[in-house]
Image: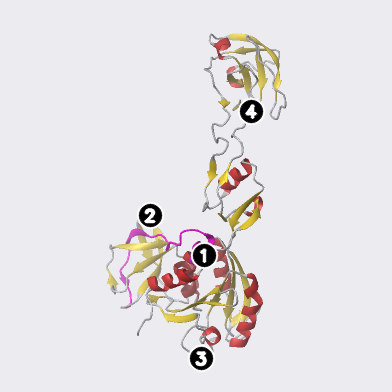
């Protein structure tokens, strides 16, 4: 069999065609998982004022140089205190965590070092200047860059956006991806199966994979095995999405609606990629906005492996991240491996530490075997047999 593309060439063509999503001003709560499209600086120092790192007593360090010592307590300082009281020489003030340091104080004695008195306090341990004090600007100075453009926003990054007073941020939003499954044999899960039918699973797995990869994935449902129905479904969703994934309809036989719909377009190609599973692949851009469409094979393992190799890196580029291939590790195979000549195999396997063992069922239709795997063993095109105990390349899932 003649193959028209290597895995690398097919991915390279995809990455040339996909575009990074346009930046959009987004409310803080919606920025999680997006990529920052601006540089963020702090308008103020953080902390903006010296404050207590602990519940305790604000003192002058020289007044507690010799312990034990008993000092009068002249007042309380709570977090959020507007005024700034003064600690006079030879006195102490009760202070709460986060409360501004009173004028004159240069140390905080944790309450655990005292008898907890409210009118007078006995202090049993001395402390140096600066003890248990968060100094103004020790985290961030006014004007400092706190996040660079291209930063992926996780919980900590979202927290610093809030911490420097930002209610919105300019980000590259998560790509919106619709998944369309084709096939007259498909039935929705939860409905009875007619003779010759199977429950449709690909769109559920692929939409979930999109979400796990940082996009917004959703199902468009099932379309019949004719190009007209497929195009109607596609055109209904095309204006509101950044990418489309189709499942099925790309093989060499009859009743291949995706191939019929796109086969005549100059902007679309169908390839035989030198890989197993997932040899039949299609990719192109369609519509006024040149929306990328990933036409994946219909067998569930084939479509999932295709997503890992081709769609996931493309989604990274669309998000504004480096479009790298899935990271691989090395492990020793616990069983001999076989692979067809001329195709790169991606064998489903279980990776445990530095050992990897292929699952017993490797058919491209065997979804349960895929569900039991947590890795793919990669066997190159020019290798047909790998002995047990050989170190191999593995892609963790």
- Residue 254, numbered label: 3
- Residue 97, numbered label: 4
Callout 4: 10 Å neighbours few (<14), some, many (20+)?
some
Up the image or down, 140 lies above or below 180; here it is above
Nearer to me, 278 or 232:
232
N-term-proximal mark, 1 vs 3: 3
Q: Is residue 369 visible?
A: no
> Looking at the figure, which quarter contains the C terminus?
bottom left
Question: From which residue to which does the magenta span run?
Answer: 314-340
Task: Tell me if residue 167 is in the magenta stretch.
Answer: no
Estimate the x, y position of residue 78 in percent, counting from the top left. 70, 26
Residue shown at 32%/66% (left/top)?
Answer: 335
- Residue 353, numbered label: 2
Estimate the x, y position of residue 2 in percent, counting from the top left. 35, 84
Residue shown at 57%/25% (left/top)?
Answer: 133
Up the image or down, 225 lies above or below 323; here it is below
Up the image or down, 37 lies above or below 97; here it is below
Nearer to me, 265 or 227:
265
């Amino acid at each position: 069999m003649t193959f028209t593309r290597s895995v690398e060439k097919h991915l390279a063509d995809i990455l040339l065609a996909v575009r990074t999503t346009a930046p959009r001003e987004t409310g803080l709560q919606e920025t999680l998982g997006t990529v920052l499209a601006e540089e963020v600086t702090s308008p103020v120092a953080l902390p903006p004022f010296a404050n207590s790192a602990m519940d305790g007593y604000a003192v002058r360090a020289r007044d507690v140089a010799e312990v034990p010592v008993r000092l009068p307590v002249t007042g309380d300082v709570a977090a959020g205190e507007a005024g700034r009281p003064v600690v006079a020489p030879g006195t102490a003030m009760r202070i709460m965590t986060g409360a501004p340091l009173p004028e004159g104080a240069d140390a905080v004695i944790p309450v655990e070092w005292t008898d907890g008195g409210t009118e007078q306090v006995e202090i049993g341990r001395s402390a140096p200047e600066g003890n248990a004090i968060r100094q103004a600007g020790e985290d961030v100075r006014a004007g400092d860059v706190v996040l660079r453009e291209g930063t992926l926003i996780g919980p900590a990054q979202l927290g610093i956006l809030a911490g420097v007073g930002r209610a919105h941020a300019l980000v590259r939003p998560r790509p919106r991806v619709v998944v369309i499954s084709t096939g007259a044999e498909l039935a929705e899960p939860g409905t009875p199966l007619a003779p010759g039918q199977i429950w449709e699973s690909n769109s559920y797995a692929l939409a979930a994979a999109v979400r796990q990869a940082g996009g917004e994935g959703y199902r468009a449902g099932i379309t019949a095995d004719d190009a007209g129905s497929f195009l109607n479904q596609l055109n209904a969703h095309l204006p509101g999405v950044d990418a489309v994934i189709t499942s099925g309809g790309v093989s060499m036989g009859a009743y291949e609606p995706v191939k019929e719909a796109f086969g005549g377009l100059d902007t679309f190609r169908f390839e035989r990629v030198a890989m197993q599973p997932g040899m039949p692949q299609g990719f192109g851009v369609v519509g006024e906005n040149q929306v990328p469409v990933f036409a994946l094979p219909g067998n569930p393992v084939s479509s999932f492996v295709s997503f890992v190799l081709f769609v996931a890196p493309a989604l990274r580029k669309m998000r504004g991240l480096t479009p790298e291939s899935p990271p691989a590790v090395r492990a020793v195979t616990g069983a001999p491996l076989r692979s067809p000549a001329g195709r790169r195999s991606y064998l489903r396997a279980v990776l445990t530490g530095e050992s990897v063992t292929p699952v017993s069922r490797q058919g491209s239709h065997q979804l349960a075997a895929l569900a039991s795997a947590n890795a793919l063993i990669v066997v190159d095109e020019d290798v047909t047999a790998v002995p047990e105990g050989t170190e191999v390349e593995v892609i963790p899932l």
